């Protein structure tokens, strides 16, 4: 188990949304000095009022940015890249940078490529979220019981990996693990992105309004995540496009195979798939 | 709201599994005289011990069957038809028969066709269940909050419909409604059968064993029903085959449309589907 972060680190969080805000809350409560960057004055004011940050800015400048040892990006992937292009000159030499985005290959490699060579970027994915967004819904408790995944590349130092794992530990994640960006994106393409595509598809494939009175738990469970932040998920899907297409094709192939069995009255074939399904689902019981 | 059942009715439950057993418990607790038929002596003994039935038989005979005004079949569809062929001669003249199966067209019309003309069969679907089966898991509380659907045809009398609705009321269902067998099967093909096919497909479309440590709520929610009673569901799928194939095709068409959008980087197209999904999902909030 990793140790917690060095208490003397000054930490900056860029982007105070649901996840960035929850990071800020968790780290401030643990006694770290946390600064924040947000686009709107009201967001900074709210974060100060809640005690999530000690100070903040809407417009980064060299004097402010230059004081932070650890910079955490709570931004959408595209915004992260453009922010760095604009402001990386102001970062403290030797600063460690990390992120929270749900796709890694398309973020980690471009950022490592374009970043100043006296700073280091290491990708991480806190697998926590809610169906709501924004600082007003931030809550450090969402990390408890959740997974924190560090996605180092050959460009990362052992020290940076250790610091990133310590960050996950400090935030209160239940499990901290390492995956390559490739293994991460394969896993997330299946467990998270494909499931969202399925839920959205089920919710929109036919008229449903007249069925609300008959809905049981099965349909509610399968469509809970059909309430979806369209801007964020469309970007995440496109940033992991090849992997998500592969996962969709795997699902599609099996769906068609089952359809064939039903069509041809292959009762034993369907039952064999269901028995396999039942056995595999048991592996996922909490 | 329907009244409860006449207290003087003598009720027989044929098949003391999860649903039949739960019916027996609910009706006995309300003070009705409930008899039971089960294949195994141990089932009858357990039902007597639990106080779910007043008396029971493993082999129906004329003297026993001839005393019941209301006969409820807690059997799989195929077994229901063969049971009636064998024993309908013993039924009390004027007896009302009903069932609990999750598909209706393929049960209601054949049963009404083959039944003695001095008895009446009316289909019903208690939309309650659990991931476990058998009398040992029976529990009358599963009906609370659930839907009870009566599926009358032109062959049914208003009196029988009223009695069947009163049965749902007496069992403690939250909502009692009427649908034609056709409308019922269309609804259940989508809300229940398609969702089970999707969950089973997701659980079996690729290797998953190495992913258990990373699984979040989305995947768990979408695969909860992937633990499935293969004998029962394969029979239900085949008994509603044409409807389920139509529902699978509607899903498939929308899934492919989404895949096309992703493939062609149609971000706005994906976002429009997600916004529709979000709006429609709100209709299903409890």
Image (spheres, coloured by chain):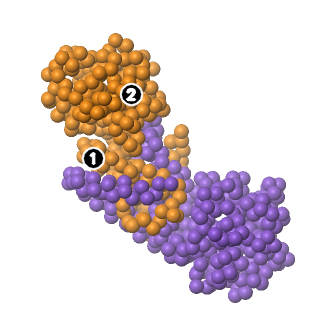
Chain colours: A purple, B orange
Callout 1 environment at 10 Å: few (<14), some (14 to 19), or many (20+)? some
Please name the residue shown 74% across and 74% down the image.
A70
Q: Is residue A93 visible?
A: yes
Q: Position of residue A16 (x, y in %)?
A: 72, 62
- Could you say which quadrant of the image residue B158 lies in? top left
Left or right: residue B113 versus residue A129 is left
Q: Position of residue A165 (x, y in %)?
A: 65, 72
Which residue lies under the disc numbered 2? B50
Element type at mark 2: loop
Q: Is residue B234 above or below residue B43?
A: below
Kindly identify which chain the residue marked by label 1 belongs to. Answer: B
Element type at mark 1: helix
Which residue lies under the disc numbered 1? B231
Please name the residue shown 72% across and 53% down the image.
A136
Choose the circle earlier in sequence order: 2 or 1.
2
Q: Position of residue B214 (x, y in %)?
A: 52, 64
Residue B207 bears which disc, if any? none
Callout 2 environment at 10 Å: few (<14), some (14 to 19), or many (20+)? few
Left or right: residue B98 versus residue B207 is left
Q: Nearer the viewer, mark 2 or mark 1?
A: 2
């Amino acid at each position: 188990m990793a140790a917690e972060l060095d208490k003397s680190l000054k930490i900056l969080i860029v982007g105070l949304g649901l996840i960035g805000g929850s990071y800020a809350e968790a780290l401030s409560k643990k006694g770290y000095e946390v600064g924040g960057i947000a686009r709107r004055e009201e967001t900074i004011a709210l974060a100060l009022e809640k005690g999530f940050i000690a100070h903040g800015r809407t417009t980064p400048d060299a004097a402010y940015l230059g004081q932070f040892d650890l910079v955490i990006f709570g931004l959408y992937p595209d915004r992260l890249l453009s922010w760095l292009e604009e402001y990386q000159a102001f970062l403290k030499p030797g600063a460690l940078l990390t992120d929270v985005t749900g796709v890694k290959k398309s973020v980690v490699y471009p950022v490592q490529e374009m970043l100043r060579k006296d700073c280091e970027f290491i990708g991480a994915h806190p697998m926590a979220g809610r169906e709501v967004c924004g600082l007003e819904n931030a809550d450090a408790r969402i990390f408890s019981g959740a997974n924190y995944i560090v996605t180092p590349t050959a460009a990362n130092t052992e020290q940076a990996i250790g610091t990133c794992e310590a960050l996950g530990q400090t935030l209160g994640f239940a499990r901290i693990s390492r995956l390559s960006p490739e293994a991460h994106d394969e896993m997330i393409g299946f467990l998270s992105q494909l499931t969202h595509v399925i839920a959205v598809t089920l919710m929109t494939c036919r008229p449903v309004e007249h069925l609300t009175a008959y809905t049981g738990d099965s349909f509610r469970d399968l469509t809970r995540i059909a309430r979806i932040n369209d801007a964020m998920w469309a970007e995440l899907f496109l940033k992991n496009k090849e992997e998500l297409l592969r996962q969709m094709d795997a699902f599609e192939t099996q769906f068609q195979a089952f359809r064939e069995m039903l069509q041809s009255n292959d009762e034993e074939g369907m039952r064999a798939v269901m028995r396999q399904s039942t056995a595999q689902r048991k592996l996922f019981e909490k």
